[in-house]
Image (tube, rainbow, N blue to C red):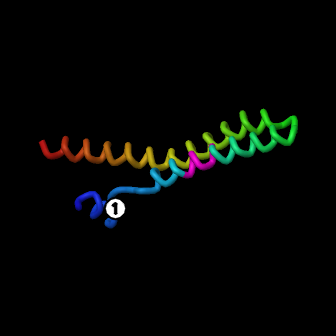
Amino acid sequence: MGALADILRFRTMIAPYVLEILFWSGIAGTLYGSYWLFSHDHWAWWIALVFGTLVTRLIFEFVLLAFRSYDRLVEVRDALRSDAGR
C-alpha cells in the first residue's frame, strides 16, 4: 500500500515508466516503417531503420534527462539533510 500511496501523493513519478513504454512503441513503429519501406522496394528503408531508431532514442533520452536530474537532486538533498543531522 505504501507504493500506491507514494504514487497518489506524487512522491513517485510514473512518467519515466510510461516514457519507457512509449520508447519501445516508437522503436517498434520505426521497425515497422522500415519493413514497410523495404517490402515496397523503397531505397530509403535503411535510412529509416538507422536514423529512425537513433532519433527515437535521442528524443527519449532528452525527455528522461529531466527525470534523472530530479532523482539526482533528491539524492543530493537527502545527503545534505543526513550531514546536517550529525
Q: Is residue 52 left or right of residue 82?
A: right
> Residue 44 in the image: x percent, y percent?
84, 37
Q: Residue at x 87, y 39 (%)?
A: 42
Figure label count: 1
Quick one: which residue is furthest to the front in this view? 39
User: Looking at this view, is 25 or 85 the one in front?
Assistant: 25
Compared with 31, 22 (above or below) is below
| Quadrant in the rendering for residue 9 | bottom left
Q: Residue at x 14, y 46 (%)?
A: 85
Residue linked to disc 1: 7
Q: Is residue 32 left or right of residue 43?
A: left
Quadrant of the image for the N terminus? bottom left
> Residue 52 in the image: x percent, y percent?
71, 40
Q: Secondary structure at mark 1?
A: helix
User: Looking at this view, is 15 or 23 the one in front?
Assistant: 23
| Quadrant in the rendering for residue 86 | top left
Amino acid of disc 1: Ile
- Near mark 1 (Cα within 10 A), the count class, few <14, some 14-19 or many ≥20, is few
* 62 falls in the magenta region: no
User: Looking at this view, is 29 or 41 the one in front?
Assistant: 41
Quick one: which residue is furthest to the bottom in this view? 8
Q: Main secondary structure of the magenta part?
A: helix
Looking at the rendering, the stretch of residues picked out in magenta corresponds to: 22-27
> Residue 22 in the image: x percent, y percent?
56, 52
Q: Residue at x 75, y 40 (%)?
A: 35
Q: Residue at x 30, y 47 (%)?
A: 77
* 24 falls in the magenta region: yes
